[in-house]
Amino acid sequence: MNSVSIHQSIQAQLLEISQSLRSLAQRIQAHAPSTMELLQSWRRRVEKIDVARGIIPAVGAAVILGALYVMIRDPFSQPTPHSPEAVAARISPIGTLTLQEPAATQIAEQGSAPAAGMP
């Protein structure tokens, strides 16, 4: 293939893409008014909603749901005890700890001599 045929091939492909984009743009423009009308109707519907009027039923529903939860779930019932094996596994020692002798005992063993640099 020479450069002229490559150029013509690219030009034909670009023309085809351009026509596809035009038809797509026309279809979008055809649906745009109905979409805008739909969005405007939703906005008008939301603007009509009185939020203050809906607060009391919302709080009432929350209270009822909370009461149902407490009655059904019964969070204040006695918990089921865990098996002794599970308790032993949870409180098994992780490591060891070595305590040093308290500083007061060390000072008493050394005597009453002040440390270097102390008055």
Image (cartoon, helix red, strand yellow):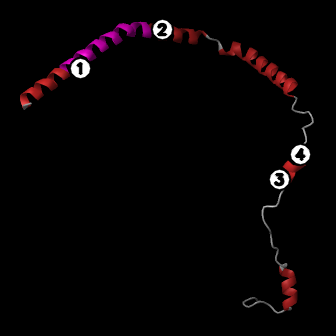
Depth check, mark 4 against mark 1: the one in front is 4
Q: Are marks 4 and 1 in contact (CB under 8 Å)?
A: no
Which residue position holds label 3?
A: 89
**Disc 2 or 4, which lies upstream in sequence?**
2
Is disc 2 placed on a helix, strand or loop?
helix
Residue 109 on the magenta segment: no
Which residue position holds label 4?
A: 83
Assess disc 2: are there few (<14), some (14-19) or many (≥20) residues with their C-alpha within 10 Å of its C-alpha. Answer: few
Q: Are marks 3 and 2 in contact (CB under 8 Å)?
A: no
| Spot occupied by residue 13 in the image (x, y as percentages of width and height) | 19, 22
Give the Cα distance between marks 3 and 4.
10 Å
**Disc 1 or 3, which lies upstream in sequence?**
1
Residue at 73% over, 17% down: 58
Give the Cα distance between marks 3 and 2.
62 Å
Depth check, mark 3 against mark 2: the one in front is 3
Residue at 93% over, 36% down: 78
Give the Cα distance between marks 4 and 1.
72 Å
Q: Where does the N terminus fall, quadrant-wise?
A: top left
Q: Amino acid at mark 4?
A: Ser
| Spot occupied by residue 113 in the image (x, y as percentages of width and height) | 82, 93
Is disc 4 placed on a helix, strand or loop?
loop
